[in-house]
Image (tube, helix red, strand yellow):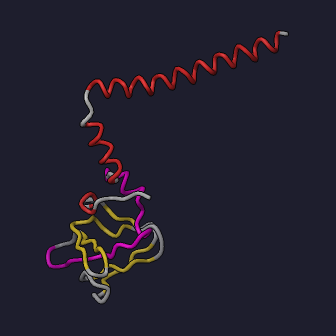
Amino acid sequence: MKTYSADEIIGKTLYIKSGTRNIRRSASTSGEVVRKVSKGMSAGVVYSWLNQPDGLWWRLDTPVNNPEWIKHETGAFDLELLKYQGAKTKEEKFREEQNANKTTGEKIVDILKKGGKVIAFLGVGVLAYKYFNNKQKQ
């Protein structure tokens, strides 16, 4: 499952993946519902987030004095569309950090390992071709 840091979502547009979600005036399930958004619709651009006792709430970028909030629920938002907007999962960021900390020698070894697999795969293909080609001639 893809896991994003809440800070990674700021500035990204949330799109509804399933069902209908309430946009509220405050970060509370008792807050006034100002609008509803359904599957495929944009909830808005995330301005910030707030961790409440009942879970995480996203504050949407709206004009001053008109805050809008949507509660985070697992499966509610389209994570693929976050990726297209440049959001990176925690796992992707961790791998990037690991790669950035590698020495030049380690990077060269990684390239050779990947290249070695390709060469081995091509070699097996050539051998299989020769084998079957010789069988057909007999």
Q: In this view, does 74 lie above or below 30?
A: above
Q: Position of residue 85 (x, y in %)?
A: 33, 53
Extreme residue toward the left, this view: 64
| Residue 27 among those drawn in magenta | no
Q: Where is residue 96 shown, x and y percent of the image?
A: 30, 42
For the point 21% across and 77% down, which residue is it? 67
In the rendered image, the vertical position of residue 59 relative to residue 6, given as above or below: below
Please, which residue is most extreme toward the right here?
A: 138
Q: Is residue 84 left or right of residue 18?
A: left
Nearest to the observer: residue 113 or residue 129: 113
The quarter of the image holding the C terminus is top right
Give residue 12's position: percent from left, percent from top: 29, 59
| Residue drawn 41% across the image and 70% down it | 74
The residue that appears at 32% across and 62% down in the rendered structure is 13
Image quadrant occupied by the N terminus:
bottom left
Compared to 138, does 100 lie above or below?
Answer: below
Magenta stretch: includes residue 83: yes
The part of the chain drawn in magenta is: 64-87
| Residue 46 horizontal/vertical position (percent) | 26, 65
Residue 68, above or below 40: below
Res 35 quadrant in image: bottom left
Q: Which of 121 and 50 is in front in this view?
A: 121
Horizontally, residue 77 falls left or right of residue 30, namely: right
- Residue drawn 26% across and 25% down? 104
